[in-house]
Amino acid sequence: MTARPFHRSQAEMLPERAAPVTTAGPVGWLRANLFSSWSNTAFTLIALYLLWLIVPAIADWAFFNADTAGDDRFACKSSGACWAWVDQRIGQFLYGFYTADQTWRVDLAVILLIPALAPLLFEGVPFARQLRWFSLAYPVVATFLLVGGIGLEGIPTDKFGGFMLNLTVGLAGIVLSLPIGILLALGRRSRLPIIRILCVGFIEIVRGVPLITLLFVSNIILPIFLPPDVTVDSLIRVIVMVTAFASAYMAEVIRGGLQAIPRGQYEAAQALGLRYWPMMFLVVLPQALKISIPGIVNTFIGLFKDTTLVIIIGLFDILGIGNAMVSNPDWLGLATEAYVFIAFFFFIACFSMSRYSIHLEKRLDTERRD
Amino acid sequence: MKAILKGAFAAAAALLVAGAAHAATLDDIKKAGVLKCGINTGLPGFAYTDDNGKWTGFDVAYCRALSAAVFGDPDKVKYVNLTGKNRFPALASGEIDVLSRNTTWTFSRDVDLGFTFIGVAYYDGQGFIGRKAMGVKSAKELDGASVCIQTGTTTELNLADFFRVNKIKYEPVPIETNEEARKAYVAERCDVYTTDASGLAATKTTFAKPSDHMVFPEIISKEPLGPLVRQGDDQWADIARWTLNALINAEEYGVTAANVDKLAAKATDNPEVNRMLGTEGSLGAMLGLRKTWAVDAIKAEGNYAEIFERYLGTKTPLGLARGLNALYTNGGILYAPPMR
């Protein structure tokens, strides 16, 4: 029996065909992600139904049925949101009680923040070397602009308010709490008992009480013990307390990063003849901080949202301004609108911080884990 | 927490009263050039910001009148905004000179915490608001009703007392803040909503159809709201007390912001007005103030009636009637001692 030659192979290449519509393009994506199984399909349909219920209602309330003009709440006749106050109150929401014709100083301080932060946050910024000197000088420049002094009208810090106060306290807290947190974390792991005990004591005491208590103590209890002529500016009290609070948390986040660094790294650094500080700054901390980025940014975001607690000591941040506004008989009962508006500001600030942290993690990812 | 706070206040107050007994508050205020007045962080009609970011309201008007009495200028006030929790420590620690923050005058605050209430600026009381559709005309008919209430306040205790005394049942719907309680009532999570009557009136105006709701006639508690100062400096307490009395007396004698200058220019036929405005006698000197202290206080925001009508009265969105806060001559209980 002679076998006929059986050709399994194709002599020439078949023309390339596009992937079937069910696996590529939008349809493929939908199948893979939303309708891959019966349970997934059910969840997708339920979610779509909920969105269909919620989104139009929110859009109607916030945009289509909303009133945007008028002098008081009685001008808002429709069923949706009443945004009429934004026109008159936006200044207070942004600047608090800051002298009205001086608000350009706040604007300028915010604009100058961009060249001050850019070289610190991003790579490839032109003139980065020169700009870093400006970054260093920025706190002085900003304080001068906001508080006044030589040539500028002096503005007492109790007039600070609105979102500008959140930014001031938040940024000061962020900038100060990172270095202090690093020092506390190193101190906690120190071999010198006094330093270790002081750092552990500070961290545990500050972390062991709510921020609201710290603010309360700084405002009410301290003046009782200080001589009557000694007064500390409320804004400074807030910044000190917020920084102390955030530093304690920061120290623990960074200690977590330090503990993840293998002993070999320390030993290798010591074998190279590095002393303590060069070892920390050149070998250990760059790795530890990189691991800690998500935790650090988490603490920053928490700190930024905690700035709304300043109402405890009678300062009016954006939330306090909102509450004061809805107490005005003309705008009574508009709390929902005010809170939505405020939430928008916080979301932008916190979401940007979160995105930046992801950007930073990607940029510093040198481990090539694949 | 409450007990601890109370202990802290008492300790703080004791410390301060010891120090304050020989410190003259008036001299300190004059030296500082500014009156530190504690007000609410925001309460409709009593303390709120206007569109220019200035504090205004019924409680704020008193601060301005007091500043005018001391300095002759109603604007020399530093407002310190206080929450319900930190108002007493702030007064005890000297952070403020006077507290004008819708504070109920009670025995323990006056006696135990070491403060001196200098009078009643507003007689408030707890009331109920409900839907007319329920067909209920009085709070006593509320058997089995659900009641929205702010927790941790005296209103909660008053409510329990009222229903116990009247032997009727109710179902409390406890809620953290006033604004949430209002929202819960609007969403029909409860049949009635209870808080101070002034607050009810303010709340009513925020409803889509205010005429569908009614405030029941029963007022179930006494809430005399007034300014207070630290105990131990009687001169300062007198100044605060008689500034308030001058505003009330000014209404009684028909002295207004508009005519006070004319009446004070030369002695009138009414000796009581003359003594108050300094054209006769020396009341100002007795207080350690200028002759025209009351003139300036009245000029700041007007007499009691003018202040009331501007911030709370029927022409404002709050639309409060004078009620108990009318002069004794008009059926209310507002009665200031004579200026002599």
Image: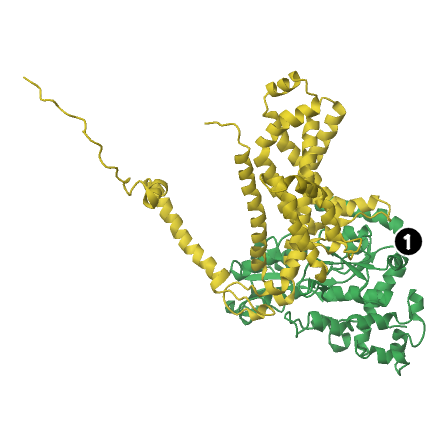
Chain colours: A yellow, B green
Q: Residue at 91% x, 53% y: name it.
A: B23
Residue A305 falls left or right of residue A22: right
Residue A334 falls left or right of residue A52: right
Q: Which percent across, then down, holds residue A143? A: 74, 49
Q: Is residue A28 above or below residue A58?
A: above
Q: Quadrant of the N terminus of chain A?
A: top left
Q: Is residue A165 above or below residue A64?
A: above
Furthest residue toward bottom: B269
Residue A227 falls left or right of residue B195: right
Q: Closest to the observer: A17 or B99?
A: A17
Graded by Cα atoms within 10 Å as few (under 14), some (14 to 19) or many (20 or more), the crowding at tag 1 reads few
Q: Is residue B87 above or below residue A293?
A: below
Q: Chain of mark 1?
A: B
Residue A188 position by quadrant: top right
Furthest residue toward left: A1
Residue B228 position by quadrant: bottom right
Q: Which percent across, then down, holds residue B200? A: 62, 65
Q: Is residue B203 in view?
A: yes
Q: Closest to the observer: A265 or B151?
A: A265
Q: Is residue B337 in view?
A: no
| Element type at mark 1 | loop
Q: Residue at 54% x, 35% y: name it.
A: A363
Q: Residue at 81% x, 73% y: name it.
A: B299
Q: Closest to the observer: B290 or A297?
A: A297
Q: Which percent across, then down, holds residue A278? A: 68, 25
Three-letter residue code for mark 1:
Ala
- Residue to which mark 1 is pinned: B23
Q: Which percent across, then down, holds residue A346? A: 59, 50
Q: Closest to the observer: B309 or B272?
A: B309
Residue A73 falls left or right of residue A4: right
